[in-house]
Image (cartoon, grey):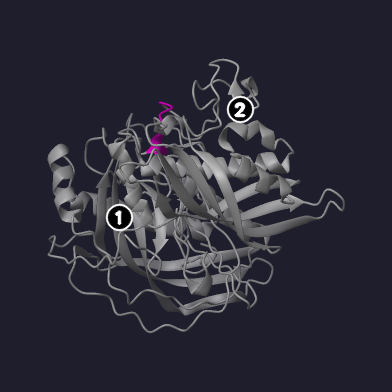
């Protein structure tokens, strides 16, 4: 599934002069960027996801870094257009590192001892630097921020499609609104964020009063032409600049996708010309929440995802990007939760990996719902639906985890996040429903690949990672509805409140730490 239509957290879109092709697989394989790089998911996501997302995303979603896509919802996404890429060398897996060996599907998942590893990260990514906002706003969480921004993008684009863009005036500055109103968005009925990357951050200096974050989105828009009634798929890459006061109070995870008055949470209908009738505040200034101050269109192409084609893997031979604080933070996590163990966490990683591949090949992600953030699940669901629509089935057979290396551990006000690099292989091919013939991939030659997967869990959660088929809250047989809630106790299992959920899948060649 490596390079199929990837999500997430993830999905793929490469934009080059050559014909566009998108590839996806569970957890990755789609390239959302140019030059053959895969998207990262979300949920979720950088190439992140939500998101995605990813069969190569993810997640949500999204930008590089852990927490891609937000765990919360975070659903999200990934999409389209991939092009010709250079043939890569055979994979040479790096040695050393915080590594866990895994011999294959036929044997138990028995992790090796934690080992010494080295720091290889070349520079501090914008997503990491954004965490400095926590010193001004202790409630700030990059994970929650990404979930909010992904949801805001989706809601604003949908509102523009329905002709009610002014509804979101509290979140749109003059510059952002002016550009959005001039775009041909009328008739947009579906928005899927395939990748989301925090590209740059300004205003973190001590004397600055406002902070600005530049976020690059890659999305797929479904639009029905008002005149002809013809439906078209549009690939869009755009940069949104969001600004807010440093001392504004951030949203909590449960409010990340709820849009109302940024000051008092009154319904949007109570806001007229930027002023709330309930609290009386001018709420479109960035004093209370993020406001879109500028939108730059980077790519806009009338084309949808093509799900057949073959693209070589890239990035397998790159050394693992390891945060030199990862091991210390892992030890600190174990001290806070004495029932936690790295080996137990890796067992859950393996369980999620194999469940993901099995459900992807079956084109039914129901069994994966408990393990994916909302954003990443949304993205992956999109790709499964697209395969069904095109009467294709992407198969990842004999999926095997070869090894796992620890890359990053982070904690914020709400979440702990662990990012690992997974080395894996599988037979990856796509079948036609009509003829049964292979239309892409190889049914006999395994495809080797690596991806960075980020799992998140609430800081308040305690206990060993689970691999049994039981609700992590009430212990009842695992039965999760499509909203991510246990059908027995109604707890939101996919929020990360009780156990580790996959929120971001990022490609090795774009992951920056």
Check disc 2 and report its element: helix, strand or loop: loop
Give the x, y percent position of residue 449.
38, 71
Q: Which mark is residue 203?
A: none
The answer to whether residue 180 is above or below residue 463 is below
The answer to whether residue 171 is above or below residue 7 is above
Q: Was residue 367 drawn as part of the magenta stretch in this picture? A: no
Give the x, y percent position of residue 224.
77, 50
Quarter placement of the C terminus: bottom left
Image point 87% across, 53% down: which residue?
Answer: 228
Q: Which residue is mark 2?
A: 274
Give the magenta part as a residue range.
489-495
Q: Which residue is mark 1?
A: 419
Judge the density around disc 2: few (<14), some (14-19), many (≥20) Cα neighbours within 10 Å.
many
Kindly check if marks 2 and 1 are in contact, taking CB atoms under 8 A apart as contact. no
| Nearer to the camera, 240 or 287 | 287
Which residue occupies the extreme top position in the image? 278
The tag earlier along the polypeptide, 2 or 1, is 2
């Amino acid at each position: 599934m490596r390079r199929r239509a990837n999500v997430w957290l993830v999905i793929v879109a490469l934009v080059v002069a050559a014909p566009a092709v998108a590839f996806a697989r569970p957890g990755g394989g789609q390239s959302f960027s140019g030059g053959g790089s895969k998207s990262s998911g979300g949920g979720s996501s950088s190439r992140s996801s939500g998101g995605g997302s990813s069969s190569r995303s993810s997640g949500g979603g999204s930008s590089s870094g852990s927490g891609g896509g937000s765990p919360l919802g975070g659903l999200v996404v990934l999409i389209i257009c991939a092009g010709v890429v250079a043939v890569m060398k055979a994979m040479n897996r790096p040695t050393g590192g915080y590594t866990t060996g895994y011999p294959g599907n036929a044997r138990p998942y028995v992790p090796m001892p934690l080992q010494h590893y080295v720091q290889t990260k070349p520079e501090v990514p914008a997503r990491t630097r954004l965490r400095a906002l926590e010193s001004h706003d202790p409630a700030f969480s990059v994970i929650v921020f990404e979930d909010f921004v992904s949801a805001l993008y989706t809601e604003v684009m949908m509102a523009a499609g329905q002709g009610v863009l002014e509804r979101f005036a509290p979140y749109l500055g003059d510059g952002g609104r002016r550009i959005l109103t001039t775009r041909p968005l009328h008739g947009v009925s579906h928005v899927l964020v395939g990748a989301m990357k925090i590209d740059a951050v300004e205003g973190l200096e001590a004397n600055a009063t406002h902070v600005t974050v530049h976020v690059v989105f890659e999305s797929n828009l479904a639009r029905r032409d008002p005149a002809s009634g013809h439906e078209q798929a549009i690939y869009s890459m755009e940069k949104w600049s969001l600004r807010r006061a440093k001392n504004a109070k951030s949203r909590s995870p449960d409010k990340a996708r709820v849009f109302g008055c940024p000051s008092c949470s009154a319904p949007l209908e109570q806001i007229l010309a930027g002023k709330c009738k309930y609290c009386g505040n001018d709420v479109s200034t960035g004093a209370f929440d993020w406001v879109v101050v500028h939108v730059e269109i980077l790519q806009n192409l009338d084309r949808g995802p093509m799900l057949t084609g073959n693209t070589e893997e890239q990035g397998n031979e790159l050394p693992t990007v390891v945060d030199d604080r990862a091991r210390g933070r892992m030890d600190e996590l174990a001290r806070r939760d004495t029932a936690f163990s790295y080996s137990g966490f890796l067992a859950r990683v393996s369980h999620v990996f194999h469940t993901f591949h099995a459900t992807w090949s079956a084109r039914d992600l129901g069994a994966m719902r408990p393990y994916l953030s909302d954003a990443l699940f949304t993205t992956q669901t999109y790709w499964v639906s697209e395969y069904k629509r095109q009467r294709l089935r992407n198969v990842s057979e004999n999926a095997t985890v070869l090894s796992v290396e620890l890359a990053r551990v982070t904690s914020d006000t709400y979440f702990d996040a662990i990012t690992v690099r997974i080395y894996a292989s599988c037979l990856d091919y796509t079948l036609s429903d009509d003829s049964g013939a292979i239309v892409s991939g190889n049914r006999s030659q395994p495809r080797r690949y690596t991806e960075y997967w980020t799992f998140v869990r609430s800081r308040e959660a305690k206990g060993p990672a689970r691999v049994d088929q039981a609700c992590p809250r009430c212990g009842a047989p695992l039965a999760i509805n499509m909203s991510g809630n246990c059908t027995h106790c109604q707890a939101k299992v996919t929020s990360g409140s009780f156990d580790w959920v996959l929120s971001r899948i990022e490609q090795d060649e774009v992951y920056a730490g």
